[in-house]
Amino acid sequence: MATWKLTLEYDGTRYSGWQEQKNARTIQGELRQACEELFGCKVDLQGAGRTDAGVHAAAQVAHLKVKGKKLPPEVILRELNDRLPASIAILRVEPAPEGFHARHDAKSRTYVYQLATRKSAFSKKYVWWIKQPLDVELMQKAAAQLVGRHDFRAFCAEDPSRPGESTVVVVDHAEFTVEEGMIQFRIVASHYLWRMVRRLVGALVKLGLHEICLEDFEQLLQGRSTERLNVAQWTAPAAGLFLAEVEY
């Protein structure tokens, strides 16, 4: 059996996320169809992260395990890209050890969320436009507190496919950077809970708009939500979120 490491990018706007679902168009489903058409057999295809509906990836990683015909990586790259829709592109195809698993072997994943500070004619699908001024310095103070081991129960939705999942996550890095017309939030963590990043961004934007205070955010980071601090209602739109990097 040949094992390949695939690195790909995609525009998730018109997809129901990465993971295959019945009666829904997904990234994994499109990629599996292309792989099985190319190799003429069933394949084992798993991704490093299950991006939600509408979320994009600049460097998703997947493993491809196949018993079919043997092809060189450059041929696999070309043939898969020929078969995939324009919104999905394979960037690299690399041989991997037989036991390689895209999700289980990943040490960390980096997500980037893009906030636009002005209207753009070209990037609407890839940003969340915030019309009011944001206190980025205050948002940065809150982001710095995310680093370390925390219980993110206030910032996640229960994943029906993983009942009873621990809500403790180790965050290695979290910061905001500002460029002309754009604010980027970058977070690096061991793993993520369902809708965790989008809800973190929603709360940080509320903080930046001075609609909540730093003490409120700290309370949420301690796992204590209230009727007033209802993070689910603040969930940031999927459009601004990208899976940016997976490290092994």
Image (cartoon, rainbow, N blue to C red):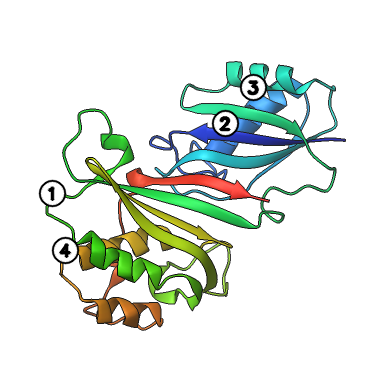
Residue 234 visible from this viewpoint: no
Placement of 124 over or under 187, stated as above or below: above
Mark 4 or mark 1, which has the lower sequence index?
1
Which mark is in front, 4 or 3?
4
Does 178 sit left or right of 46 as displayed?
A: left
- Helix, strand or loop for disc 2: helix
Q: Is residue 172 left or right of residue 119?
A: right
Q: Amino acid at mark 4?
A: Leu
Instruction: Indicate left or right for 122 with 109 as reference.
Output: left
Q: Secondary structure at mark 4?
A: loop
Q: Residue at x 16, y 37 (%)?
A: 119
Asked if labels 1 and 3 touch by Cβ distance under 8 angstroms, the answer is no
Quick one: label 4 or label 3, which is nearer the N terminus?
3
Is residue 76 depicted above or below 44 in this figure?
A: above
Q: Amino acid at mark 2?
A: Glu
The numbered disc on residue 30 is: 2
- Whichever of labels 3 and 1 marks the residue nearer the N terminus, that label is 3
Measured in 3D between alpha carbons, the distance from the residue under mark 2 to the one under mark 4, in whole angstroms, is 40 Å
Task: Report the Cα–Cα distance between label 4 and label 1.
Answer: 10 Å
How dense is the environment of label 2, judged by Cα within 10 Å: few (below 14), some, or many (20 and up)?
some
Up-down relation of residue 200 to residue 225 (above or below): above
For marks 2 and 4, the one nearer the N-term is: 2
Nearer the observer, 131 or 51 = 131
Residue at numbered disc 3: 80
Q: Nearer the viewer, mark 2 or mark 4?
A: 4
- For disc 1, the marked residue is 131
